[in-house]
Amino acid sequence: MQKKANLILASKSPYRAQILSAAGIQFDVHPSVVDERAIEAPLLRSQMDVNDIPLILAQTKAMSVSEKIRDAIVIGSDQTLTFENRLLHKPENMEEARRRLLMLSGKTHNLNSAVALAKDGEILWQYIDTATIKFRELKPEFIGRHLARVGKAALTSVGAYQIEGEGVQLMEKIDGDFFSIMGLPIIPLLNILRELELVDG
Amino acid sequence: MQKKANLILASKSPYRAQILSAAGIQFDVHPSVVDERAIEAPLLRSQMDVNDIPLILAQTKAMSVSEKIRDAIVIGSDQTLTFENRLLHKPENMEEARRRLLMLSGKTHNLNSAVALAKDGEILWQYIDTATIKFRELKPEFIGRHLARVGKAALTSVGAYQIEGEGVQLMEKIDGDFFSIMGLPIIPLLNILRELELVDG
């Protein structure tokens, strides 16, 4: 039997919960309430590589929830899209999604997926992985039809696409780990959870 | 709207159908009835690289169905697992699945995923992709518990695992395309379907 784990996912992302569940992991969900943009702002003004910002956010989310729930192991995670050295967030509406896809058309962008574990407010482990996605040249009319098909789902991810859905229709080439693209690098996470005896070894 | 396509999947694999459906493709399913082992036997005795055998099988399946259903574009596909230059098939029972996982433990194996398109008995296009998976060192007791958890699902794939399920618990490292590992390299397939104007471009 899978061992009972006092494991908490500090994220409200259904994709991350689904990856953990599919892998056979038992956990509870307690989304963190940190103001991500407020943490990010000074980092963006610093000399920090934009690709490393999700690592800071993943740690902050894990720490903040673990300070409230003693003895639990808390998983914090974050994913950003970086494009031409700029950091992009989830599109807020369909018009922004349309502009996002048009901007990424024919170009390559990075998805940076970070995960951190914390206990009692201390970071135990952290990991970041970058995947690279090249979009094919998309006609504006195609983008319009595509977004009409996928609807509001386009607003649930930084790239305005789901790789596990029609998002593959946008892509020319994927380099990197599928789970990182989905938002949770599950294999390194399982390795550390196994070491901590939170999953069956 | 997605264009109506006279597209047929010559496979009874639910995983392949799911990948196509998720990508927003409309198709019918007509599994081929070719005797795969009979086709394979002389190939195994030949000088052919075992990694290339699924390409022959994918073509054969696509051709055989397309000869029966005129004017349709037929997708044939095949996946094999090669390990130490041997070709392995789906385990037939749980004991064979157990031995398969024990054999792959701590080692690296290849998943070769081929896809071919045929029309009126002629091959239009073909593609093969190899992904490499390294298993972690698995204790026999873990394998027993793992197979008890996943059950008969272990018998539905050549590696006795599902990467989209608890199979990730077996893995140390995945190199290659997720969709190829699932059994259908969807991005190159979409490229050719777009050229053939069978999917929206």
Image (spheres, coloured by chain):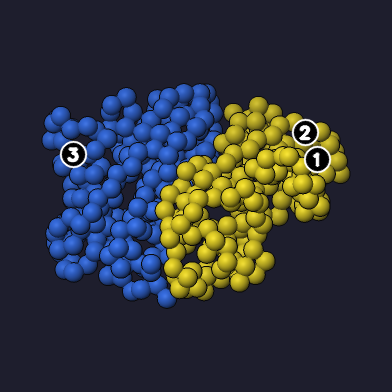
Chain colours: A yellow, B blue
Marks 2, 3: nearer the viewer: 2
Q: Are marks 1 and 2 in contact (CB under 8 Å)?
A: yes
Residue B153 visible = no
Kindly identify the residue that appears in the image at 64 percent across and 42 percent down.
Answer: A51
Q: Is residue A175 left or right of residue A98?
A: left
Name the element at disc 2: strand
Three-letter amino acid code at the position of disc 2: Ile
Residue A64 visible = yes
* Residue named by callout 2: A123
Kindly identify the residue that appears in the image at 65 percent across and 31 percent down.
Answer: A192
Marks 1, 3: nearer the viewer: 1
Kindly identify the residue that appears in the image at 52 percent across and 64 percent down.
Answer: A102
* Residue named by callout 1: A63
* Residue named by callout 3: B40
Please check whether the numbered discs 1 and 2 fall on a single chain. Answer: yes
Q: Is residue B129 left or right of residue A168?
A: left
Q: State the CA–CA distance, disc 1 to disc 3.
A: 55 Å
Q: Are marks 2 and 3 in contact (CB under 8 Å)?
A: no
